[in-house]
Image (spheres, rainbow, N blue to C red):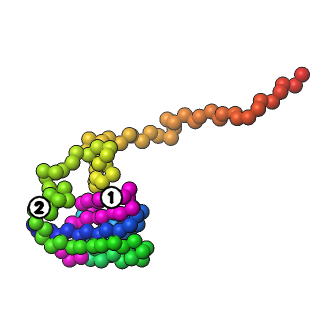
């Protein structure tokens, strides 16, 4: 293996996203996996890259998590063994097809998904206003 893995475990999904943002901005690493437990109350982020980049990214994630009081654990694994990749489901054998259940953990473009074409503003017809409330009585 010519790469390293960095793991960061934090409380709360929102704080995990903030920590991941800090990790990705500070170093050239790739976000490869996320594991959510307890309904998103415990989140583990996994990044991949060169050893120095992974260490810098994990340090930035730790700093972000500690500033919010949500840091739980972290680790950097240099040149992980192939069995580690199986455990994290990062090997080719365990690669999941993207569907509605796994899309939340997918990173990158979704294969086979076409986004709707944007239509011009002129092509959109305005809706007629809907009157609510009582009708006025006709004058006699």
- Main SS class of the magenta portion in the image: strand
Magenta range is 31-55
Q: Quadrant of residue 89?
A: bottom left
Residue at x 31% of width, y 49% of height: 103
* Residue 87 image position (x, y, % from top left): 17, 59
- The local crowd at label 1, few if under 14, some if 14 to 19, many if 20 or more residues have their Cα within 10 Å, is some
* Residue 50 image position (x, y, % from top left): 18, 72
Above or below, comparing residue 105 to residue 116 in the picture: below
Assess whether residue 111 is covered by the magenta stretch: no
Mark 1 lies on residue: 36
- The local crowd at label 2, few if under 14, some if 14 to 19, many if 20 or more residues have their Cα within 10 Å, is few
Residues at marks 2 and 1 touching, judged by CB atoms closer than 8 Å:
no
Residue at x 26% of width, y 46% of height: 98
* Residue 49 image position (x, y, % from top left): 20, 68
Quick one: SS at disc 2?
A: helix
* Residue 2 image position (x, y, % from top left): 11, 68
Assess whether residue 46 is covered by the magenta stretch: yes
Pick out the residue farthest to the top.
140
Q: Residue 49 carries which label?
A: none
First in sequence: mark 2 vs mark 1: 1
Q: Nearer the viewer, residue 70 or 52?
A: 70
Mark 2 lies on residue: 83
């Amino acid at each position: 293996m010519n790469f390293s893995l960095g793991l960061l475990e934090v409380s709360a999904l929102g704080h995990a996203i903030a920590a991941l943002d800090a990790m990705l901005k500070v170093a050239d690493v790739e976000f490869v996996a996320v594991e959510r437990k307890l309904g998103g109350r415990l989140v583990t982020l996994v990044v991949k890259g060169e050893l120095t980049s992974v260490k810098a990214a994990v340090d930035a994630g730790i700093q972000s998590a500690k500033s919010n009081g949500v840091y739980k654990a972290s680790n950097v694994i240099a040149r992980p063994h192939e069995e580690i990749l199986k455990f994290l489901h990062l090997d080719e054998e365990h690669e999941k097809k993207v569907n509605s259940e796994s899309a939340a953990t997918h990173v990158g473009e979704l294969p086979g998904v076409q986004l709707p074409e944007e239509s011009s503003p002129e092509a959109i017809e305005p809706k007629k206003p809907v009157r609510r409330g009582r009708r006025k009585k006709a004058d006699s």
